[in-house]
Image (cartoon, grey):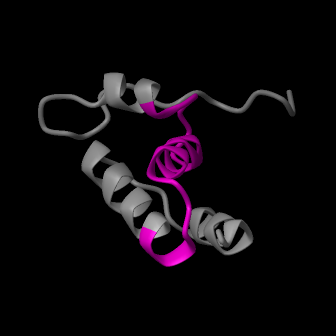
Amino acid sequence: MSDVPAAVELLARVRPSTIQGVKSLAAQLRKKHGIKHSDALEMVSKAAGFQNYRHALAASGPSGHFSVSPKKDTSHV
């Protein structure tokens, strides 16, 4: 059984800056909170400011750091 609220709380505090960080945090969520790995990748990527995991993957440069800034929240403008 997954513990999504605890996972969401963790994602509010942690923001990965590399694709490896996204993968690592997703693996932690899978192990500790019982979330499917693919769902965890999506959750972490969104928490990092990307539309989804594939967007985060495409934005990672050769070093693994994100070469493109994630989408900005303009809903309050």
Looking at the image, residue 4 sits to the left or right of residue 43; the answer is right
Residue nearest the observer in this picture, 39 or 49: 39
Residue nearest the observer in this picture, 9 or 17: 9
Looking at the image, residue 54 sits to the left or right of residue 64; the answer is right
Please provide percent x and percent y for residue 9.
67, 71
The quarter of the rendered structure image containing the C terminus is top right
Q: Is residue 69 above or below residue 49?
A: above
Residue nearest the observer in this picture, 35 or 50: 35
The quarter of the rendered structure image containing the N terminus is bottom right
Which residue: 48% across, 57% down? 15
Which residue: 37% across, 62% down? 27
The extreme right residue here reads 76
Please provide percent x and percent y for residue 10.
58, 71
Which residue: 52% across, 54% down? 36
Q: Quadrant of residue 59?
A: top left
Q: Tell me, yes or no, whether the highlighted magenta stretch contains residue 27.
A: no
Please provide percent x and percent y for residue 37.
45, 52
Looking at the image, residue 74 sits to the left or right of residue 58; the answer is right
The extreme front residue here reads 1
Count of numbered circles in the view: 0
Q: Quadrant of residue 67?
A: top left
Q: Tell me, yes or no, whether the highlighted magenta stretch contains residue 52.
A: yes
Q: Which residues are magenta?
A: 31-53
Which residue: 30% across, 43% down? 19
Magenta region, main secondary structure: helix
Q: Is residue 37 above or below residue 66?
A: below
